[in-house]
Image (tube, grey):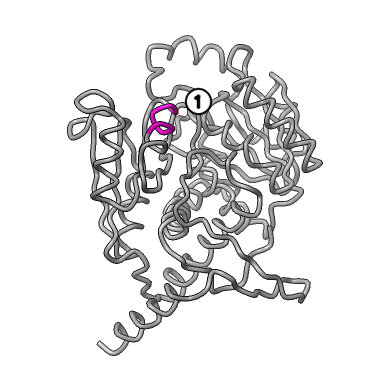
Amino acid sequence: MLFNLRNLLNAATLRNGSKQLVQHFRSGQPTQTNINLKGRDLLTLQSYTAEEIKYLLWTASDLKQRIKDKGEYLPLLQGKSLAMIFEKRSTRTRLSTETGFALLGGHPCFLTTQDIHLGVNESLTDTARVLSSMTNAVLARVYKQSDLDLLAKEASIPIVNGLSDSYHPIQILADYLTLQEHYGYLKGLTISWIGDGNNVLNSILMSAAKFGMHLRVATPKGFEPDPNIVKVAEEYSKEYSTKLFFTTDPLEAASGANVLVTDTWISMGQEEEKAKRLKAFQGYQITMQTGKHAASDWTFLHCLPRKPEEVNDEVFYSPRSLAFQEAENRKWTIMAVMVSLLTDYSPQLQKPTF
């Protein structure tokens, strides 16, 4: 009883604390942060600065250490509710969001296409206004990015992209946290993407350079990422002095890479293209032979669910695979997003090196 009361009092103190916090970095110099994301949407990482994305990862690391490692009770979202709109099925996005929001004291409400049809039974504008009056935030997993954009325009509460056909920002946050935990840093790492030019790759293109990471991309001809997104990524590469390379040769993309990444070749809604895609992606399976072209410390990421044609068992279940740590980190990163967008909480533990 006393333990729970003490933690509740501590949580109240943290919520009322200032958003400015002095931390000591490896250099020993005090550094002040004044980043406040409260009330923001998260539709794409393009709209977040390098320091803002690092802040989200810092918060995720902080919550993970305090709650998982130290066993602290942090009801930071007590009294808050979240509308979860899912047009597409999900394992990790649903579980990480539901359990994470509840762990922080909040109430998640899961809504499928059987409960709510965006723009069908009710206009997106009306839906956004109704949800704004009853919940504190919306996480939506949808097909069209434009639906998210309209929800964000019409809602008065934060809208979070749980996945769209264009972007998957919350997945990439988990990827970066996983790599930071494994390597101890992100700057200077080379990521090799071998697969489809899809929403996950788009989110990497919108963010990797902001951490000083290099990116090598291999996609089959006809399956390249959106040219408009590539153009922005090229601008980021110049701004942050990183290397960005595109090819159709998986082994060329893997050359010197620290991280080999792939994803499903057949995304939800593309089932009719299965035969065509399987033929186009022949030779794109990641194996130990692929790893021989990578750096000696190479690791493997996959956002799951995984198919054997994308990566063989030898790699997927090897010590080089970080896929399950990556999956767990979906929970800590979405918790960080919700805490950052809905509260005044500041990380209490030392900022990791990025």
Q: Where 11 falls versus 284 (above or below)?
A: below
- The number of numbered discs placed on residues in the rendered structure image is 1
Q: In what element is the residue under mark 1?
A: loop
Q: Quadrant of the C terminus?
A: bottom right
Query: In x, y percent, where is residue 48?
Result: 59, 46
Q: Where 117 falls versus 22 (above or below)?
A: above
Which secondary structure dominates the residues rendered in magenta?
helix
Q: Residue furthest bottom?
A: 2
Residue 22: in magenta span = no
Query: In x, y percent, where is residue 82?
Result: 30, 51
Q: Residue furthest top?
A: 276
In the image: residue 269, left or right of residue 171: left
Closer to us: 123 or 111? 123
Q: Which residue is mark 1?
A: 309
| Rendering quarter of residue 25 | bottom right
Q: Quadrant of the N terminus?
A: bottom left
Residue at x 63%, y 56% (from the top left corner): 180
Query: In x, y percent, where is residue 124?
Result: 30, 30
Magenta span covers which residues? Answer: 145-150
Q: Where 111 falls versus 282 (above or below)?
A: below
Query: In x, y percent, where is residue 188?
Result: 76, 48
Which amino acid does the dot numbered 1 rest on?
Glu
Closer to us: 140 or 174? 140
| Rendering quarter of residue 79 | bottom left
Closer to us: 88 or 338? 338
Residue at x 46%, y 66% (from the top left corner): 344
Bin the neighbour count of mark 1 within 10 Å (Cα to Cα): few under 14, some 14-19, many 20 and up. some
| Rendering quarter of residue 27 | bottom right
Residue at x 48%, y 28% (from the top left corner): 264
